[in-house]
């Protein structure tokens, strides 16, 4: 076979039938993982035929942080969902004598690709994505050399080990809860709604389908505002601000024929903004509006907030993600194998608190603070 000018790990993987991460570990002589002699011989032979030249051991040791550094890629850590998730990963990593670095993307495709390109040359042991990464050359490259785990939605498109929750089913729980309380007209408020933010759309679809089948006379008012990566970076409290602004729009609909009596926010932070707008308007929760969210971050359990929400098992998901990554790295039970994708699914759980109640009866006057 003629040698390629710039052979890649991907080409070796295609020839041998093994994953790019397995090929990388074999060619780099990772001592914490083991492969059969036949597998090692097959990979090395393919690399030699293609003319692949691995980095020198000296170069690798100079860059690999001792092989005990894991990167966590987040949209941001201003939302307690992500900061709690990162700390739970750090707790699990500390028990295994690993260190963690966190990189925020602010949902920018360019910034994410730049982070991944840097990580590809940093010799890190593995990566945990707290949301599904965007397709890019940088992503394809790093997945060929570094083990990775994704924390995301059920049925994600990437063939990677995944810790997931079914956000569609989570919305079904919320919809049935509100229907059971007599709510027929609700509003869904969200930050950017597009295909890139698939979890937000699945939460909306769950509401729409459940109301369509179990409350056919009902309606869902959808209010969203696009948030750019620049805004997310600049404003630490952008989600709260979006919730506040969108709730103001919903309050303007109160004089319509079928005003919303319940608000479903895309997450708890957006819900807090809605709550502030309702209280500022002199209205009461849940007597005038029921409000609920997703994630069950810590402030949601505080008595003045008492938010009905869907538990996202934040701490458990972080610890499971690191455990799965450790297995791929080889520090636990070895690589599960190139053809085996592990998926750990958490079942959504509705946490009912004081922010939701029976729909106001027809003709009841909306209460105003004196």
Image: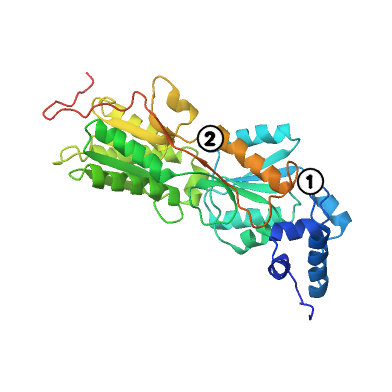
What count of labels does the image hold? 2
* Contact (Cβ within 8 Å) of mark 2 with mark 1: no
Q: At 75% from the left edge and 59% from the top edge, which residue is drawn?
A: 24
Q: Report which quarter residue 181 is drawn in.
A: top left
Q: At 39% from the left edge and 43% from the top edge, which residue is drawn?
A: 169
Quadrant location of the C terminus in the rendered image: top left
| Residue designated by label 2 | 314
Is 98 left, or right, of 76 in this rendering? right
Front-most of residues 55 and 175: 175
| Residue designated by label 1 | 67
**SS for tag 2?**
helix
Compared to 370, does 318 lie above or below? below
Q: Report which quarter residue 92 is drawn in.
A: top right
Quadrant location of the N terminus in the rendered image: bottom right
- Residue 317, which numbered label? none
Front-most of residues 48 and 58: 48
Compared to 166, does 281 lie above or below? above
- Residue 190 position, x and y percent, is 37, 44
- Residue 260 position, x and y percent, is 23, 38
Compared to 15, does 110 lie above or below? above
Distance from the alpha carbon under mark 2 to that under mark 1: 27 Å
Q: At 42% from the left edge and 38% from the top edge, which residue is drawn?
A: 267
Residue 52 seen in this snapshot: no
């Amino acid at each position: 076979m003629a040698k390629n000018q710039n052979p890649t790990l991907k080409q070796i993987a295609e020839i041998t039938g093994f994953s790019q991460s397995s090929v990388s570990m074999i060619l780099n002589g990772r001592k914490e993982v083991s492969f059969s002699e036949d597998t090692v011989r097959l990979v090395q032979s393919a690399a030699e035929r293609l003319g692949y030249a691995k980095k020198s051991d000296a170069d690798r040791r100079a860059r690999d942080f001792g092989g005990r550094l894991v990167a966590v890629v987040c949209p941001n850590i201003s939302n307690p969902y992500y900061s709690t998730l990162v700390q739970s990963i750090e707790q699990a990593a500390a028990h295994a004598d690993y260190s963690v670095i966190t990189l925020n993307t602010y949902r920018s495709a360019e910034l994410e690709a730049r982070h991944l390109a840097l990580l590809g040359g940093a010799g890190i042991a593995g990566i945990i994505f707290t949301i599904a990464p965007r397709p890019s050359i940088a992503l394809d490259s790093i997945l060929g050399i570094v083990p990775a785990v994704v924390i995301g939605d059920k049925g994600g498109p990437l063939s990677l080990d995944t810790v997931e929750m079914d956000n569609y089913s989570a919305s079904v729980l919320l919809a049935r809860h509100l229907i059971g309380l007599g709510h027929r007209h609700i509003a869904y408020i969200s930050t950017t709604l597009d295909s890139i933010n698939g979890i937000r759309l699945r939460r909306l679809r769950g509401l729409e389908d459940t109301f369509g089948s179990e409350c056919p006379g009902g309606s869902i008012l959808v209010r969203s505002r696009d948030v750019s990566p620049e805004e997310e970076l600049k404003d630490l409290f952008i989600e709260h601000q979006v919730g506040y602004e969108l709730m103001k729009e919903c309050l303007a609909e109160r004089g319509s024929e079928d005003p919303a009596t319940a608000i479903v926010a895309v997450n708890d932070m957006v819900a807090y903004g809605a709550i502030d707008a309702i209280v500022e308007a002199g209205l009461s929760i849940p007597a005038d509006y029921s409000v609920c969210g997703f994630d069950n971050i810590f402030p949601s359990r505080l008595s003045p907030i008492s938010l009905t929400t869907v538990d996202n098992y934040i701490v458990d998901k972080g610890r499971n993600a690191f455990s799965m990554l450790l297995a791929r790295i080889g520090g636990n039970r070895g690589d599960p194998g190139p053809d085996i994708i592990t998926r750990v699914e958490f079942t959504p759980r509705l946490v009912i608190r004081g922010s939701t109640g029976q729909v106001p009866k027809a003709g009841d006057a909306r209460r105003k603070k004196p």
